[in-house]
Amino acid sequence: MALAKRISNNKKRQVSQLVVQATKALSIGRYDLCAPLCAQIEAIWPENSDLANIRGVASLHAGNPDQAEAYFLQAIKAAPRRVAFSKNLATLYANQNKPEAAAHWYGLALELEPSSLPIALNLSKILIDLKRYDEAIISLNKASRYHLDNDAILMGLSTVYFRIRRYDKSLDCTDKALKNNPDHPDALLQKAHLQRGHGQLKDAEITLRKLLAINPEHVHAGTLLANLKCFQSDQDADIALLKHIHARTDADSQQRETICFALGKVMDDIGSYDRAFSYFDEGNALRSRRSAYHADTELEHMQAIMQHYNQDVLECRSDISDATPLFIVGMPRCGSTRVEQILAAHPDVSSRGEWHCFEDMLFAMHTQDNPLTLERIAAFDADQWEGIGESFLQRLKADSPDALRITDKTLINTRLIGAIHCAMPQAKIIHVRRHPLDTCLSIYQSNLISQQFDYAYKLGELGYYYRMYQRLMQHWREWLPDGVMYELDYEHLVEGQEAETRKLLDACGLTWNEQCLQFNKAGNIVITRSMAQVRQSLYTDSIGRWTHYEQHLQPLIKILG
C-alpha cells in the first residue's frame, strides 16, 4: 500500500494561499481563474481536500452535477470532519430533488456542527417535505437549544405542527414568533390561516390587513383575503388592491398564477363570469407550463388498477373486523369537506382530514431492489394485508383511541379502494359525487397545489381524467361486496339535508344526532380549499354553477358527453 506523499509546511502554506485565491475567484464568479489555480494546487498536493471541494463547486456552476458529486465525495473522504464539504453535497442532492440523500448529508453536517442554524433549517425543510415530521421536530428542538426563541425555528416548528394537524401547537409557535417580531410576514400569514381554519374570519381579515399594510404587494395575503370574503360590487376597494398585485407580478411567475385565481374568484363573486374565466384561463395556462403531466401515462395507470384488482385479489383480504375507519373519497371540490364536517360533528366521530397515511404506508414498502408495483400488491396474501391494516389502525387511533369512527378524507384514495378493502374489509368507503360539470369547473377555478392535480390545468385533460375516474369508481361499484361503499350525491344532500344525513349516519353505523345538522357551527378547525364554505349552512348556489360558464366549457362538455 503506497503511503501518502509527505507535504512540507512551506508547501502547505503555498497551498493554503492558492486555496484562498481559488475560493475568492469562486465567490466573485471568476470560474475561469479556478482551473489554473487548481492545477497549481494539484502539482503540490493532489490529495488536498480543498482542491476536490473547489473543483466540485466549479463543476456545479459549469452545469456538471455528476462530476461535482464525485468531487464532493472525494473531498469528504479526504477530510470527513469538514462541515462545508458535507453541506455542499447535501445542497447538491437537495437541488437535484434527491431528498433522502440530502437529509442524510445535512444530518451528518449537523452532527459535526450542531449549532449551525442554516444546516438545521435546511435539514428540517427536507424532513418536512419527506413527511418525516417527528424527526423534523426533534431536529428543530435541538437547534432551539443553541438559538433560543429564533423566529425561523419557531416558524419551522409551526409548519410541522400544522402539517400533523396539531394546530394548537402551530398557533403557539406562531404567536411566539409574533411576540419577537409583530411584523413577521410569514407568522402573520400563518396566523391568518389558523384563524380562518377556526372560523375566526373577522380576526383573520384584521391579521391580513396588517400584513398588507406592511407589504401591499404580498401575493398570498391578497389571495387569502380574496378567498376570505364574498365580494358584492366591482367598486370594492380590495379589487383595486388585487389588480395592483396582479399588475406588479412577473407575467410568468408562480405569484401571477396565484393572484389570477384570486381575481377569478372575485369576478365570479360579482357575477362577471367572462372576466372571471379569463383570469382562471391565465392562471391555469401558467400552471400547465410548469407541469410535467402526461395524460396517457396517468390514464393508463388508472386502467391498470382496474385490471389488477379483480375478484380474486379483492377476495384475498385480512380477517380484521374493525369498522373504525371511514374513508371519504371522490374528486376534489365534490362536497367531501362538508360530508366530513357533518360526520365530525357527531360526538362519536373524530376526523383525520386529508391524511395520506394509507398511501404513505404502501409507498414506504417501495425500495430500489423491490419496487412497489401493481403486480406486487396484487400478489399480497391475507397475512400481508392484515399487517398493513393493523399498522394503519394503530396510527389512526393514536390521537383518538375512544372514537367509534374516524374519518380519513384523502380523496386520492379512489385509486386505493381495493387495497383499503383488502387490508380492512369492514372499513366504510364514502364516495361523494357532484354534477360532473360543477365538479370540473370548481377544480379549474381552484388552483389545487400538488402534482397529483396536474390534470386540472387544461379543460381537455381534466375531462379525460374525470371520465377515467368515473370508470374506476364503476369498477369498485361492481366488484366490492355490497355495503362496503356508500355513495352520496352532493345535490341530494343540499336539497334534503336531514334525510341524507340520516342515511349517511346509518350507513356508517352511527346513531342519529342533531349536531350533525349544525356542522357549520362545530368548533373543529378546517384547513382545506373549502374552509370558508364549511362555516356556512348548505346552500343551493353551488348547484348548476357551470351554466354561467357554458360557452367557455365546450371542450369539457364534449368530452363528458
Image: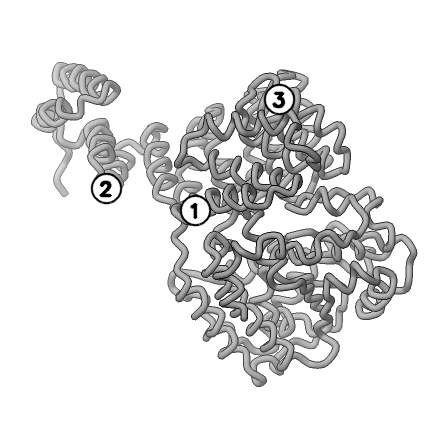
Q: In the drawing, what numbered circle is on residue 285? A: 1
Say what amino acid the circle numbered 2 marks: Ala
> In the image, what residue occupies the spot 73% across and 46% down?
533
Q: Quadrant of the C terminus?
A: bottom right
* Sequence-first disc among 1 and 2: 2
Residue in front for this viewpoint, 59 or 185: 185
Q: Are marks 1 and 3 in contact (CB under 8 Å)?
A: no
The first of marks 2 and 3 along the sequence is: 2
Mark 3, residue position: 211
The dot on residue 322 is none
The alpha-carbon separation of the residues under discs 1 and 2 comes to 39 Å
Q: Quadrant of residue 311?
A: bottom right
Between residue 548 and residue 114, name the one nearer to us: 548
Q: Is residue 296 left or right of residue 425?
A: left
Which residue occupies 64% across, 39% down? 162
Q: Residue 230 in the image: x percent, y percent?
A: 70, 37
What x and y, as percent, mark residue 6?
A: 13, 26
Pointer 1 or 3: first along the chain: 3
Measured Cα–Cα span from mark 1 to mark 3: 29 Å
Front disc: 1 or 2: 1
Judge whether 476 appears above or below 85 on screen. Answer: below
For label 1, the SS is helix
Q: Find out whether the residues at labels 2 and 3 contact each other: C-beta distance under 8 Å.
A: no
Q: Secondary structure at mark 2?
A: helix
**Which quadrant of the figure has residue 176?**
top right
Q: Are circles 1 and 2 on residues that touch, CB within 8 Å? A: no
Residue under the point 41% across and 30% down: 250
Give the mark toward the camera: 2 or 3. Answer: 3
Question: How far is the residue under mark 2 from the one under mark 3?
Answer: 46 Å
Within 10 Å of disc 3 (Cα), the crowding (few <14, some 14-19, many 20+) is many
Q: In the image, what residue occupies the spot 68% across and 66% down?
A: 431
